[in-house]
Amino acid sequence: MTTTAHPAGPHTGAAAAHRTHEVTNQAPPRSGLDEYGTNVPLTEAVAVFGAGRHEPELHGIGRLVGSETFQADAELAHTSPPVLRTHDRYGNRIDEIDFHPAYHEVMGAAVRHGAHTGGWADPGPGAAVGRAAAFMLFAQIEPGHACPMSMSHAVVPVLQRDPEVGRDWLPGLLSRSYDPRPIAPGSKSGLTFGMGMTEKQGGSDVRANTTRAVPVASDPDGRAHLLTGHKWFFSAPMSDAFLVLAQDGAGLGCFLVPRVLPDGARNTIRIQRLKNKLGNKSNASGEVEFDDTWAVRVGEPGRGVPTIIEMVNHTRLDCVLGTTAGMRQSVSEAIWHAHHRSAFGARLTGQPAMTAVLADLALETEAATWTSMRLAHAYEDGGGEPEAMFRRLATAVSKYWICKRGPHHAYEALECLGGNGYTEDWPLARRYREQPVMAVWEGSGNVIALDVLRGIARTPQSLEAFWTELEGTAGASPVLDAHIGRVRRDLAEDLRDPVAAQTRARATVEGMALALQSSLMLRHAPAPMAEAFVAARLGEARGHQYGILPRGTDAAAIVARHFGEG
């Protein structure tokens, strides 16, 4: 066989190939930063709300989640999603879910740093705020694992109110050891929890649930039951136990369902499939069937909704925290890109139109951050009745508004990256798909808005506590004062007509949320930022898109505050 040699020319060879494909004008990876230390509003809020003792660990978490290694694990956890194995190779039913090792790395790190139950395990000043900040830092980079972290946190007060059940589960929940093995709970070094409330025929109307609970005759305490039914959404089915609702003869009861029984045998939790979710792919959400599935009742018979509602309130708080964490990721990536990218002869952060958009995204993020930390502070021990009344409405109000703002915020940040943002190689496409879940989970828009009305009707003092919170900035802003006056007058009028109240429920809650955010910004954010936020959200010249700021706003200073170069 004869070969023909081609003479070497000026454009052949590896070196020439590199010269024809030189990558320029691209932002470097945003890694190697302390995501806590560079988040100025968060660090300020942690100090303001009394969690300063947690700062050393929060800086450690910030460096961890900002590292290239953690970000690579977050990426792998999404690109290698969990796989359901209903049977082993011999045909035995096993209902196991296989995760990429990177997911376990993320979970292990979050548990080691108490992002799940650190606030309960280490009580004291700022415990709830410190845990909230830790949770947000992990959720900022990898949102999927935040689901079992949140539910493990939220189940603790439910079990504390029922010590007969809680004594077997609380030690493992409060542990900082991550143990994913499917073995008897008493043999594990750490535990996580999930939840199963909704069924396909009812959704948010959980009182329409048809899952049945039959007492185990041999149990002298009447606690043990066998459940039969179907759960349409079963959150984090790889967890060690779950709180579920089932009809127990006296009404809708609350039950704890372990994945593995105390003797090491598998409980009958048949995972029918994993949900094909819009958002994160790292965490599993399932659809399961119970068939004489062993469970223990938590709380009183027929009192399932009042029993589980405390868990719901804490997971609603975490929806706010998770959305805010997503806003931080979105605005950070957008500003980072714009700082390192040039177009039309200037850096993007030097282009006034882009700077206005980035500044507006930063204002939204800062308002959400102060609101998140104020809410977490309301869950601290020792707050008394006033704080309990405040959080009763403020959690739902903030959950409605901040979680509704999340998807649009993520989209606008994505657009700042142009075509790069629209690809799955950058984190903002994943964030855009993820943000809607916080608005849907634990009550979609109408459910939350109507819950605010129910809260006002059942506990009028909760509304007074909300207005009292806003009195701290009375007179500081004529625009805010006028807004609060309108909201109070409209609400008083609407409450006289139940149909009008429900029809205008979203308007009421939106108005309350913006009043709370504006008041918090005026109290805690730098004055130019606070004034810009109030004018941009409540002023006569407010717009409907990001990037419409009051005349005279120092957008560059706002962007610089949120740049986080490290």
Image (cartoon, rainbow, N blue to C red):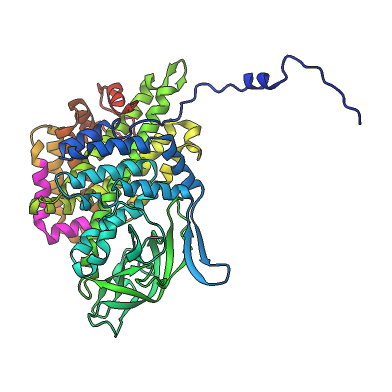
The secondary structure making up most of the magenta span is: helix
Residue 279 visible to the viewer: no
- Image coords of residue 228 (percent x, y): 38, 77
Looking at the rendered image, the quarter that the N terminus falls into is top right
Vertical arrangement, residue 252 with respect to residue 546, above or below: below
Q: Between 146 and 60, which is closer to the camera in this rendering?
A: 60
**How far across and down, in percent of the image, does residue 420 sit?**
49, 33
In percent of width and height, residue 126 lies at 17, 44
Q: Is residue 154 above or below residue 115?
A: below
| Residue sitting farthest toward the right | 1
Q: Residue at x 34, y 47 (%)?
A: 110
Image-quadrant location for residue 129: top left
Q: Nearer the viewer, residue 432 or 243?
A: 243
Q: Is residue 540 magenta?
A: no
Q: Residue at x 36, y 32 (%)?
A: 332
The quadrant where residue 377 appears: top left
Magenta-colored span: 448-470
Residue 464 in magenta stretch: yes
Query: Residue pushed farthest bottom?
Result: 217
| Residue 460 appearing in the image | yes
Above or below, 441 relative to 24:
below
Of 279 and 493, the residue lying toward us: 279
Tally the marks. Answer: 0
Q: Is residue 23 left or right of residue 378?
A: right
Q: Position of residue 492 (x, y in %)?
A: 12, 52
Q: Which image quadrant: the C terminus?
A: top left
Residue appearing at x 84%, y 21% in the figure: 5
